[in-house]
Amino acid sequence: MLAASLVSPGAALAQPEPQAGESAPPEDKKGEAASRFYFSHTATLLPSGQVLVAGGVDYASGDSIASAELYDPATRTWQPAGSMGADRHDHTATLLPTGQVLVAGGVDHASGSLASAELYDPATGTWQPAGSMGTARSRHTATLLPSGRVLVAGGVDYASGDFLASAELYDPSTGAWQPAGSMGTARRSHTATLLPSGQVLVAGGYTSEGDLASAELYDPAGRWATAGSMLTGRVHPTVTPLPDRRVLVVGGLSHAGYEARVEQYDPASRTWLPAARMNSARHAHTATLLPNDHVLVAGGNSSDGPLASAERYDPAKETWLPAGAMNRARTYHAAVRLKNEQVLVAGGWGSGGALSDVERYDPGTGQWTPGGAMQAARWQFTVTLLPNGQVLAVGGWGDVGARSDAELYDPSTDRWELVPAAMSNARTGHSATLLRTGHVLIAGGAGSDGVLVRAELFDPETMSFSLAAPMRHARTGHVATELPDGRVLVAGGADTGGPLASAELYDPTANVWHDARLLRTPRSKPAGLLLDDGTVLVVGGVGAGGIPLATAELFELFSNGTLCRQTADCQSGFCVDGVCCNAACDGSCDVCAVTTDIALIPIGARIPGTCEPIDDVACDDGDACTQSDVCQGGVCVAGEPKTCASHACDKVTGQCLTLCKSVRDCMDGKVCDRTHQCVDAPPDAYHHDTSDCALAAPDAPPPSPRALTALFVLALAALGARRPRAVA
């Protein structure tokens, strides 16, 4: 009741709900009372020093209310603050960096828990909608993250009676809500605390089984974001982007066997919806987007063996249409759309083993025609369309094991030509990614040498392979995707220990790999795709124990000001003071983070993620012999020098020397004698001896060459004068 004694009964913070038979507390006579007594509201301290009290339950009527009021501590008065679009109580209110207040969820008097959110702008004194959460909830928590986004977690949906484990993120810059995964335990009336690490500690609360003692951590920079779960777990599905930005996921292998079921992923809502089934169940097939936005699915494996059939998906009508049959049944083949808009299908595995034959599909006529055969039979290999229109086929399984060779297809001549020099390693299950330089990055895979860590670059100009920097982890059956900034994300796969959660980024400009944050679920043989917003979607695959996975995950490069742990987290490529930064910001008097308790820095930047110099902060100029160094104008200025008796201070250790080699090892006014001690300088000596010990004071001018020559002649004369004469 401390808050009630400071303001009024109507704005009591965290007031417990009155029980039957209780009466309202007496009005506080020290200040003006609010318009009425209510509870289960929120109270938010604004930058102006005023307190915004919003919503709640009217004690007299028992109805939830939409009105809001402002308390001014300076005048101890209350004034109206408009009304929200919906009456609500048991909601949350969060002060944003903009000064606005985000109110989310709660319960109204009619429909139960709310999904809606609203923004209060103190500058205008008005309320406006702030979108809707994916799930209606009340008695949840809302935590402002260092990135400026708001994490909403848990709660209860009174309409269904369900306790919630789900979490969502609100981004003030876009006004959008997105899923943020789920807690391990559904809970309401819990606490959520932002830790110095940037993580959020969720503790306690209540669930359908009673009070909770458990706690868990939300880590915004720790792992990939969840993208919901498919309706069916599947291995080796295909993923294809549709014109409306949805993603078509087709076929694969599930617990039920070969799949004909199809799903669509909506990136905007991060939800999955079923789509029309294919005419034939298939796995290890290909899917190619055609010029008319249809998706051509060809071949694959089935319960009856390899398939020759093909079909087209029409996203406008959401139906599947026959697309004829290939001349050869095949699976584990490769397909690519050529610049003439035809689809090239090559190799694979058929009834007779590894295949070398090729077919071309013409979307205009719907016909399949044979093409020139490859130089070598191969399956589970990669094909890459090069900028010059040719197609590079690399590695794969052959008749007698993994292959190290590669060949080029020229559509103008319908001929294949072996690349003169093979790769350094035979491999299959690798990835091939076209870089902006025109080179093709070949990474990982497996062969006679086991699972590979090696990567190679193919240069179309020289028709040759060269070694690239090796990956940080050996892997096969992974996904590789070029990001908008030209770096390549490699994720998942497997090694001899099973499916991997690790991911890494390749930087072509520096020829170096960086560890990236881990997948939430280790997975091998997933499918991956770059979405229009620059995030990477990874779906399905094989999990631990050989289980087909239904889960999907998203990798995004964080914008400046967002929490990070490593370089690979950031769009800029710079992770400084625990946040993504616009520059390397590696000076001792540079800072990039705003929140000092997270970055553990004395002064924060004014703009999150923007490197700027700081002043009047202790620093280290690199000289251990200066004390109390301080930042001035972004430069570390040396402080007072350490004082030593005779010998100088060692700039590395900061300790006074005990021996000298030259005058530079002595304090001012001292010289180094032949015993390597710093002593007072002789007043009439101006030369250095052969041991580099100076016999001249440091401030004395050096002798001229003429004076040194004269001294040398005089010394010789003196020696000659003292030489004994020979006896006759």
Image (cartoon, rainbow, N blue to C red):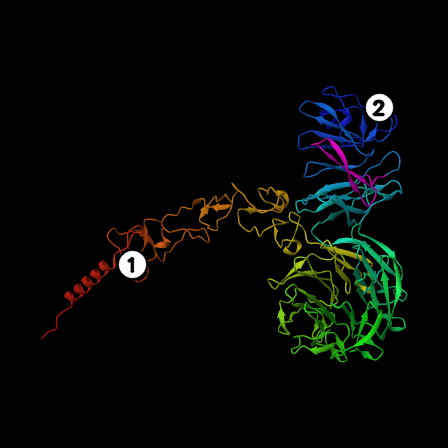
Residue 10 visible to the viewer: yes
Query: What span is in magenta?
Result: 113-139
Does any portion of residue 208 appear in the rendered image? no
Quick one: which residue is furthest to the top in this view? 29
Q: Where does the image place residue 333, in percent across and percent down from the top left?
A: 79, 72
Local crowd at mark 2 within 10 Å, few (<14), some, or many (≥20)? Answer: few
> Between 602 and 291, which is closer to the camera in this rendering?
291
Query: Which tag, 1 or 2, sits closer to the chain's start?
Result: 2
Residue 222: give x, y in percent of width and height: 70, 53
The answer to whether residue 121 is magenta is yes
Depicted 77 relative to depicted 594: above or below: above
Q: Quadrant of the C terminus?
A: bottom left
Quadrant of residue 161 within the rendered picture: top right
Q: Please state if 634 lies on the left or on the right of 543 as rendered.
A: left
Label 1: which residue?
688
What residue would you read off at disc 2? 23
Query: 175 or 66, which lies in front?
Result: 175
